[in-house]
Image: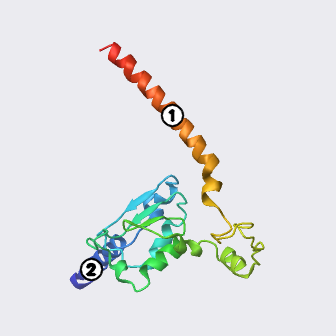
Amino acid sequence: EQEQEQEQEQEQEQEQEERGRTLIVQDTGLDKCASLEHIFVQDNNIDNINEIANVASLKNLKSLYLRNIDGSQKNPVCEHPSYRSSIVRQLPHISILDGERLKHSNTFYADPAASQSSSTAQVQIPESKSWLSGFTWEEDKVDVDKLLAPIQAKFDAVMSDSKKLNSAAVALLSHYQ
C-alpha cells in the first residue's frame, strides 16, 4: 500500500514536471489571447519542439523568446539541431526569435505554394536600353567649355545677385546694431 502511494506521488510529480516543461496553451487560455504579440518563456524547461505549434494560432505574435540573445536562460528545446528552422516553419509570421531579427529569407516557410509558384513562374525582363544613347566619350568631339558655358554664365549671374543681397543684408544689420 505504501509502495502504491509512493508510485502515485512519483507519477504526479513526473506529470507536474512534464506540464512545467510544455507550453500548454489550451489549459492556460493563451490561445484566446488573439492580440498577444510577444511571448517570453526563457528558462521554463520546454523540451519538445512540437509544443511550439500550440502558439501557431496567435497570428499577431511578433516575437518569441525561448532563450536570451546571449544564449542564457535557455529551454532544453533550444539544443535541438533544427531549432530555429523548426520554429520559423511553425510560426512563419514571427519576426523576432530569441531577440534576433529573422531575415526575410526565413519567411519562405510561410506559404510553400507561393515559393513553388515563384520558382517556376516566368519572369519578364524588359529589353535593355542604353542610358547614354547619343553620348560619346571621345574628348576630341566634345568641347566641354562650350557645353558648360551657358550653365557657367547662369551660375555667375546667380552668384553676383547673391553677393549683392548679402551686402544689402549686412548694411541693414549694421544699421540696427
Going by the picture, which residue comes out furthest to the top? Answer: 176
| Camera-nearest residue between 51 and 96 | 96
Identified by mark 2, the residue type is: Gln
Quadrant containing the C terminus in the rendered view: top left
| Camera-nearest residue between 56 and 101 | 101
Q: Secondary structure at mark 1?
A: helix
Identified by mark 1, the residue type is: Ser
Spot occupied by residue 129 in the image (x, y as percentages of width and height): 75, 70
Spot occupied by residue 60 in the image (x, y as percentages of width and height): 52, 57
Which mark, by number, is residue 25?
A: none
Q: Residue at x 56, y 42 (%)?
A: 155
Which mark, by number, is residue 10?
A: 2
- Figure check: 80 above or below 157: below
Spot occupied by residue 122 in the image (x, y as percentages of width and height): 77, 78
- Figure check: 40 above or below 117: above
Nearest to N terminus: mark 1 or mark 2: 2
Which mark, by number, is residue 160?
A: 1
Mark 1 or mark 2, whichever is nearer to me? 1
Spot occupied by residue 8 in the image (x, y as percentages of width and height): 29, 79
Label 1, label 2: how far apart the Cα atoms are: 95 Å
Image side of residue 134 versus residue 73, left or right = right
| Camera-nearest residue between 110 and 55 | 110
Quadrant containing the N terminus in the rendered view: bottom left
Q: Residue at x 34, y 82 (%)?
A: 79
